[in-house]
Amino acid sequence: MPNIKQNFCPACGKNVSIDDTIGGVCIDCFIKNVDLIECRENDEIVVCKRCGAFYDAEWKNSVDEEDAVLRYVSSRIKTSNELDEQDIDLMAERMDSNRIRVNGILHGDLKGKIIEKTFSSIVHIKYTVCDSCSRISGGYYESILQIRADDRGLNNKEQTDVKKIVNDYVTRRYEDGDKRSFITKIDELDEGIDFYLGSKTVSKQICKAIKLKYGGEIQRSSKLVGVKDGKNLYRVTYSLRLFKISPGDVISFKERFIQIIKVAKDIEGIDLKSGKTVLLEGKKSNIDSIKIFGNIKKAVDTDLLSIGDKIIEVVDPYANKSVKILKPYFIDKIKDNRVRVIKTSTGLLAIPPEYYNISIKKI
Ligand SMILES: [Zn+2]
Ligand SMILES: [Zn+2]
């Protein structure tokens, strides 16, 4: 095009300043010849009939079909780059069971001229089953999360808590868009619980989260289950073995008697002789040298007969005779001459009253 200063529109012939032309023509001619907005009059969306997810390059969760259609249409609309201050309003209108009309208004600014353009698209809904729903219904799983405890089964609180942690995590991740975050099956066994999960990553993260709260040791193992697109497919098992001790246990560790208060990544307790807090690193060598005498739930209330300088006399409820034991540091807290005791390898031990209910304390 020759570089001459033109002062009329070559398309309609009207006088126009060069600053008011776009692509060499006046704004009116530009609008006539160019689509400011491209939006298909008829479109098709694929929706999962089980979970409502829609397909747009990948499966995406939706609140409902109207939401799916609006987001789908919105991602496919193209507008002219010449238009400044663009703003698009979309509204969904249900036509029948498998058609939704989207009505839209485009607002914008074309060289100072305010533009408003309406458009609409009829979206046909096609139903199918998404990848993750078909995996779930096909019993698919990528990982097993095993929760066990050393030398014991899981207690009720651990079972309830673990199920809640897994369910909450899987649901949250799914709602955040991870379509592989699902539970195919839960097996409740005498020795623990197995969760069959759609995603290795989810399995691993839940395993770590439970360990952080309850302590224990994680083991990972994998099994070759097939080949897909030339790649080996592995099914991974994350196994968390909780420590044998739980809150409320009375234990001995390196010649100290300890009342366990909290079991998480580390173990917290009270030295029953000094009343001092004890923190044990939750590692295997420590756990292995722990001896458990029993849980506070098994402790028995008995009569306090006399209090001396260094010893007290109580009724041994197991032998039904009076015995002398070390005077506890919490002697001032004992009321009505009743004290709770537990049997250990070196005789009876008194339990501080503030920990009588430790086993049901929420951690
Ligand atoms: Zn013109
Ligand atoms: Zn689905």
Image (tube, helix red, strand yellow):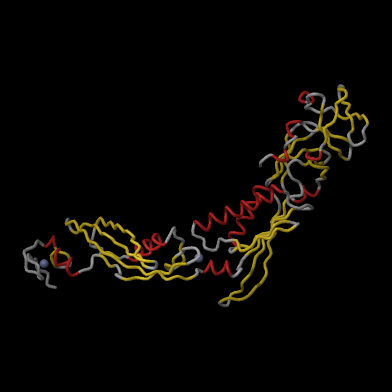
Image coords of residue 7 (percent x, y): 7, 64
Image coords of residue 85 (percent x, y): 25, 55
Image coords of residue 202 (percent x, y): 58, 59
Q: Say if 26 sits above or below 263 in the image.
A: below
Q: Say if 176 sits above or below 339 in the image.
A: below
Q: Specify the farthest residue to the front.
A: 96
**Would residue 91 appear left or right of 140 to someone viewing this image?**
left
Q: Say if 168 sits above or below 332 in the image.
A: below
**Would residue 159 appear left or right of 20 to someone viewing this image?**
right
Q: What residue is drawn where x is 46% and y is 61%?
A: 61
Q: Say if 246 sits above or below 51 in the image.
A: above
Instruction: State the image quarter where residue 126 is shown.
Output: bottom left
Front-most of 172 and 259? 172
Instruction: State the image quarter where residue 293 is shown.
Output: top right
Image coords of residue 237 (percent x, y): 67, 63
The quadrant of the rendering that contains the N terminus is bottom left
Q: What residue is drawn where x is 80% and y is 25%?
A: 331
Q: What residue is drawn where x is 64% and y is 68%?
A: 235
Front-most of 6 and 282? 282
Q: What residue is drawn where x is 93% and y is 31%?
A: 321
